[in-house]
Image (cartoon, rainbow, N blue to C red):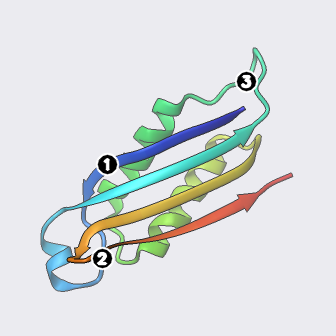
Amino acid sequence: MRIHIKELEIYAILGILDFERLKEQKIVIDVEILYEYSKNYFINYADISNLIEKSLIKNKFLLIEEALLSVEQEIINLYPKIKELEIEIKKPDIMPNSVVSISKKWYFQ
């Protein structure tokens, strides 16, 4: 099965610039998870969404890269049977004329 979580909006502190540390900004996350579904094993997409939101709000990351790697590690720790994980974190309001983001895809055995 492949889970898609698209355009998860979170308001959190994320960034190294002075103004980014003072006020929460909109962060948009897309996640894709590939795993082997069975009656005894499934991944609840609501739990994944909540995990991401709590992590970003609590940790107030300085770098978007740190946020991405931390979220990846938390998801993998909870769901070790994931075969593929792709995360994209976007900061749509940081620049007036573009949306900036980072993404990474992991493959697991």
Residue type at numbered disc 3: Tyr
Percent coordinates x, y for residue 13 in the rendering: 25, 66
| Quadrant in the rendering for residue 67 | bottom left
Callout 2: SS? loop
- As shown in the figure, which amino acid type bears the numbered disc 2? Gly
Give the structural element (helix, strand or loop) at label 3. loop
Mark identifier at residue 41: 3
Marks 3/2: CA–CA distance: 36 Å
Q: Residue at x 78, y 20 (%)?
A: 38
Give the residue at x 17% y 84%: 18
> Between 80 and 99, which is closer to the camera in this rendering?
99
Between 11 and 21, the residue placed more toward the observer is 11
Would you name the residue on which mark 2 appears? 15
Contact between labelled residues 2 and 3, with CB atoms less than 8 Å apart = no
Say which residue label 1 marks. 9
Q: Is residue 92 above or below residue 17?
A: above
The CA distance from mark 3 to mark 1 is: 27 Å
Q: Residues within 10 Å of mark 2 (few under 14, many from 20)?
A: many
Which quadrant of the view contains residue 57?
bottom left
Q: Is residue 17 left or right of residue 76?
A: left
Q: Position of residue 94 (x, y in %)?
A: 24, 74
Quick one: quadrant of the N terminus?
top right
Q: Would residue 42 appear left or right of 9 to someone viewing this image?
A: right
Taking the spot 46% from the left edge, 31% from the top edge, the residue there is: 46
Q: Secondary structure at mark 1?
A: strand
> Who's the residue at 30% across and 69% down the image?
14
Say whether residue 84 is left or right of residue 104.
right
